[in-house]
Image (cartoon, rainbow, N blue to C red):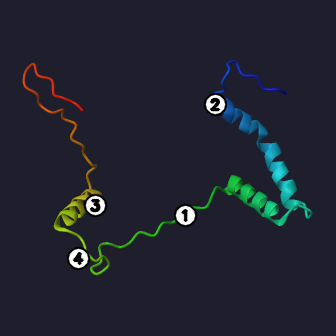
Amino acid sequence: MPVTFPRDVPTMRDMMELARMASPDCIARLVEVRDNPKAPFMAQITAAAMIMDRGLGKPHQSIAIADLTTPGKLDLSAFSPDELRDFERLLTKATSDQPPTRDITPPKASRGVVPETD
């Protein structure tokens, strides 16, 4: 059954519907490749991984973050005083309980004078 679109460019919803309609055939093809002893080994492994990802979701990845709270883990002697102040400011922002704020106050101008912009 052909799918027709009422407009020239399909929307994301249209594309998702097409993907849903094709999913059973795609999974069946992946199973065929996985179970075919004549298929290249890497094709079988890839098909198996795709089936697993589709059924179980992709595995979570963990990222190792350096422990900066333990003394001796970071050598600060190489940093200038300005860099240390910047680092302390960023670390304080990152560890505060309040969401970061941004000052969006426009610069003050004299009455009738428009500030110059570059």
Q: CA distance from mark 2 to mark 1?
A: 29 Å
Q: Mark 1 = which residue?
A: 61
Q: Mark 4 = which residue?
A: 77
Q: Mark 2 = which residue?
A: 13
Q: Residue at x 85, y 56 (%)?
A: 33
Q: Are marks 2 and 1 in contact (CB under 8 Å)?
A: no
Q: Position of residue 79 (x, y in %)?
A: 23, 70
Q: Mark 3 = which residue?
A: 95
Q: Quadrant of residue 110?
A: top left
Q: Residue at x 24, y 45 (%)?
A: 101
Mark 4 falls on what kind of element? loop
Q: Amino acid at mark 3?
A: Thr
Disc nearer the start of the sequence (1/4): 1
Q: Amino acid at mark 2?
A: Arg
Give the mark toward the camera: 4 or 3: 4
Give the mark toward the camera: 1 or 4: 4
Q: Position of residue 1 (x, y in %)?
A: 85, 27
Q: Quadrant of residue 41?
A: bottom right
Disc nearer the start of the sequence (2/4): 2
Q: How many dots with numbers?
A: 4
Mark 3 falls on what kind of element? helix
